[in-house]
Amino acid sequence: MGGHHLILGELKDFITGALLPDTHDERYRQRIARLLVEAKGYRRSDIHPRIPIDLKIDNRLARIRMDYVVKLDSRIALLIKYAPGSLVTRHQVALAAARLLAPYGIPFSLVTNGEDAHLLDNADRSLKGQGLDQIWDRPTLERHLQKSTWQRVSPRQAEMATRILLAYEVDGRCPCDDTVCDLDIR
């Protein structure tokens, strides 16, 4: 993997055991995975890394990846988006991705830069917690899921979510970011 990331060697993925390029960003992702398992009570089998989202609209096709999703009872309950920098700028990305990864709106998102975190309720877009210590543990997430409606995503919502992700994650990415696949199918 090239791009703008300093490659420090390889590291072992905490969730899957796969060897990955050791970058500063990947170290933060691994820190989040460890926190979820070791401090928050999630099982490794609950956490699914590097989930692809195919974006297709008009004559555009692209593939991006979300860092993690947490599945409980065979449903995605929590989407996790890591990116360096400001967390507020990642809210729209997480909310849009939560409408595209499943036929229902994923109830909660976590955006993090590895040092701080925002826990979001995707239905009402409210901030449920701020800080790594405010990330819900597994029993707390399960309790909040009991109140979730799991509303179906309409075609219009999916279209708007796709446009948001294309703008933020594809068009707005760093020119040397080689983790996004952008295909022109005109």
Image (spheres, rainbow, N blue to C red):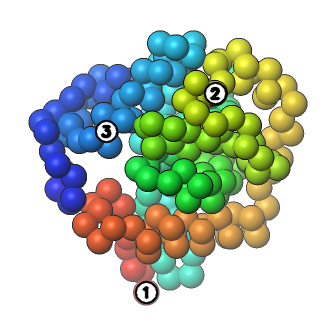
Q: Which three-letter amino acid code belongs to the residue tagged 2? A: Gln
Q: Which three-letter amino acid code belongs to the residue tagged 1? A: Arg
Q: Dot 3: few (<14), some (14–19), or many (≥20) neighbours within 10 Å?
A: many
Reading the image, the residue beneath label 3 is 26
Say whether residue 177 is left or right of residue 9: right
Question: Which dot, 3 or 2, sits closer to the camera?
Answer: 2
Reading the image, the residue beneath label 1 is 186
Residue 102: horizontal and vertical position, in percent? 66, 47
Q: Dot 1: few (<14), some (14–19), or many (≥20) neighbours within 10 Å?
A: few
In terms of depth relative to the viewer, which is nearer, 130 or 34? 130
Say whether residue 37 is left or right of residue 6: right
Asked if the residue under mark 3 is in contact with the one under mark 1, i.e. CB atoms within 8 Å, the reply is no
Reading the image, the residue beneath label 2 is 134
Quadrant hosting residue 161: bottom right
Q: Residue furthest left?
A: 9
The quadrant the C terminus occupies is bottom left
Quadrant hosting residue 70: top right
Q: State the residue at coordinates (42%, 80%).
A: 185
Give the secondary structure at mark 1: loop
Mark 3 or 2, nearer chain start: 3
In terms of depth relative to the viewer, which is nearer, 20 or 63? 20
Give the secondary structure at mark 3: helix
Give the secondary structure at mark 2: helix
Q: State the residue at coordinates (56%, 44%).
A: 111
